[in-house]
Image (cartoon, grey):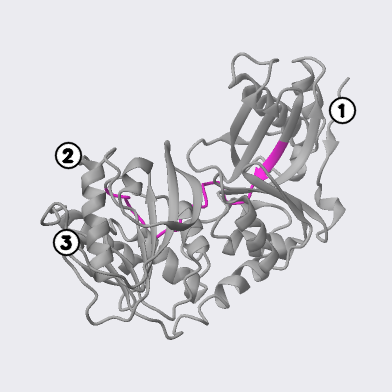
């Protein structure tokens, strides 16, 4: 009979806790550097995640502060399957009653890629049975299931014969910072925006602008990073608060120490959007993020705006690709925009995210940095351009079109 191999149990203490922090593809090395800055040294990168061990205090710090992690998991046990029936037989032996009380509710998220299971939901059902049966046997009652707002969230990962069961520290994607109601049209996720800003490494000393700001996610993530505002400061309650190893004094101490950098001096941060709906949404998000007075939003066509009163700074742009937001001629549009940038943004550093590499070439600049990213289902390039002073030429196609 297959036996579960325990990865962690409360009896093992709080000094060496295993963890898995998942991330978006392309941000593995940046996430590793982020957790190292938090003091976690025993970690290594894998595809779309980092793994390692840390203390409970460091685990909580990572949950509270990480901007780049999508999920933070605590692995509890592993099983090597010899046949499909091994799943229940092994997992029912793990002491789930030491983590989940009958008064709790729980839910299971699953990722299954295995020759043993044609129905990918079946392993999750067997894990649910194992947890319920074990707790009923030990406690006389069983916990309930709540798929939407469970007090404990379990994560099941099956890769061929290898099974790992973990607890999810938050119970939701860590991109849910708490300041955003709706993303508007073609929104960037908060973790994607945070990863982009981490790559840009804006230091707050020079102006930052987003000419197509939408709901202002890029600007909010940039300012929160500079001010060192923890990503989870306004997020929903974390599931880890229902774990037996939870320390309320430790967790609330993180919140109490979180606002000390709010008043650091900072260069102007500006956002533009022509859409009245996006303009209102951006203002709303900035207010909810507690950043009023630190980010200025204008309902304006950034293709016409020039930084006449600003020193050279950084632009981070997520322009239309011709995918979700239609452009009659994307390549011509990018060429016109490139002319506008060359003519008015000499000395600036420009970062552009786009799913249209052919159109990006028409900007007319040579990039100095590039990384491949996913914006939802779209394959994108995120590129850096250093705009140096040069001869101003005539616009090859006349006026820049409205957007």
User: To which quarter of the image does residue 275 belong?
Assistant: bottom left
Q: In this picture, which residue range is highlighted in magenta? A: 165-184
Relative to residue 284, is residue 126 depicted above or below? above
Q: Residue at x 44, y 52 (%)?
A: 382
Does residue 92 appear anywhere in the picture? Answer: no
Q: Which mark is residue 328?
A: 2
The kind of secondary structure element at disc 3 is: loop
* Magenta span includes 180: yes
Residue 61 appears at what percent x and percent y? Answer: 65, 65
- What's the CA distance linking mark 1 and mark 3? 73 Å
- Near mark 1 (Cα within 10 A), the count class, few <14, some 14-19 or many ≥20, is some
Q: Is residue 255 left or right of residue 394?
A: right
The kind of secondary structure element at disc 1 is: loop
Does residue 144 appear anywhere in the picture? Answer: yes
* Magenta span includes 316: no
Choose mark 3 or mark 2, whichever is in front. 3
Q: Residue at x 76, y 28 (%)?
A: 162
Residue 191 appears at what percent x and percent y? Answer: 48, 53
Q: Residue at x 80, y 35 (%)?
A: 94
Determine which residue is flagged by label 1. Answer: 3
- Near mark 2 (Cα within 10 A), the count class, few <14, some 14-19 or many ≥20, is few
Q: Which mark is residue 394?
A: 3
């Amino acid at each position: 009979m297959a036996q579960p191999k325990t990865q962690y149990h409360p009896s093992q203490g709080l000094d060496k806790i295993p963890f898995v922090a998942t991330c978006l593809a392309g941000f593995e090395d940046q996430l590793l550097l982020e957790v190292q800055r938090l003091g976690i040294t025993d970690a290594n990168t894998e595809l779309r995640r980092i793994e390692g061990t840390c203390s409970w205090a460091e685990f909580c710090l990572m949950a509270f502060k990480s901007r780049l992690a999508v999920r933070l998991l605590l692995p509890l046990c592993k099983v090597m399957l010899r046949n499909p029936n091994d799943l229940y037989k092994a997992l029912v032996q793990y002491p789930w009653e030491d983590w989940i009380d009958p008064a709790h509710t729980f839910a299971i998220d699953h990722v299954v890629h295995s020759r043993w299971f044609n129905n990918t939901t079946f392993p999750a059902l067997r894990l649910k049975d194992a947890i319920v049966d074990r707790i009923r046997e030990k406690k006389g009652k069983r916990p309930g299931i709540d798929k939407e707002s469970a007090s404990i969230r379990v994560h099941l990962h099956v890769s061929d014969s290898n099974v790992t069961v973990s607890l999810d520290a938050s119970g939701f994607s860590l991109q849910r910072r708490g300041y955003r109601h709706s993303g508007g049209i073609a929104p960037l996720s908060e973790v994607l925006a945070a990863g982009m800003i981490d790559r840009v490494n804006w230091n707050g000393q020079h102006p930052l602008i987003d000419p197509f700001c939408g709901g202002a996610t890029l600007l909010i993530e940039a300012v929160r990073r500079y001010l060192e505002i923890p990503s989870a400061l306004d997020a929903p309650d974390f599931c880890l608060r229902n774990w037996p190893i939870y320390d309320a004094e430790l967790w609330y101490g993180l919140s109490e120490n979180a606002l000390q950098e709010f008043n650091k001096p900072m260069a102007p941060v500006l956002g533009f959007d022509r859409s009245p709906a996006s303009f209102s949404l951006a203002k709303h998000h900035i207010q909810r993020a507690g950043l009023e007075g630190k980010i200025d939003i204008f309902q304006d066509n950034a293709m016409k705006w020039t930084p006449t009163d600003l020193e050279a700074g950084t632009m981070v742009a997520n322009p239309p690709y011709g995918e979700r937001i239609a452009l009659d001629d994307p390549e011509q549009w990018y060429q016109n925009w490139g002319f506008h940038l060359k003519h008015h943004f000499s000395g600036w550093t420009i970062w552009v995210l786009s799913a249209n590499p052919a159109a990006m070439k028409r900007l007319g600049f040579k990039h100095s940095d590039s990384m491949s990213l996913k914006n939802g289902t779209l394959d994108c390039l995120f590129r850096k351009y250093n705009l140096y002073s040069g001869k101003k030429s005539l616009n090859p196609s006349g006026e820049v079109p409205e957007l």
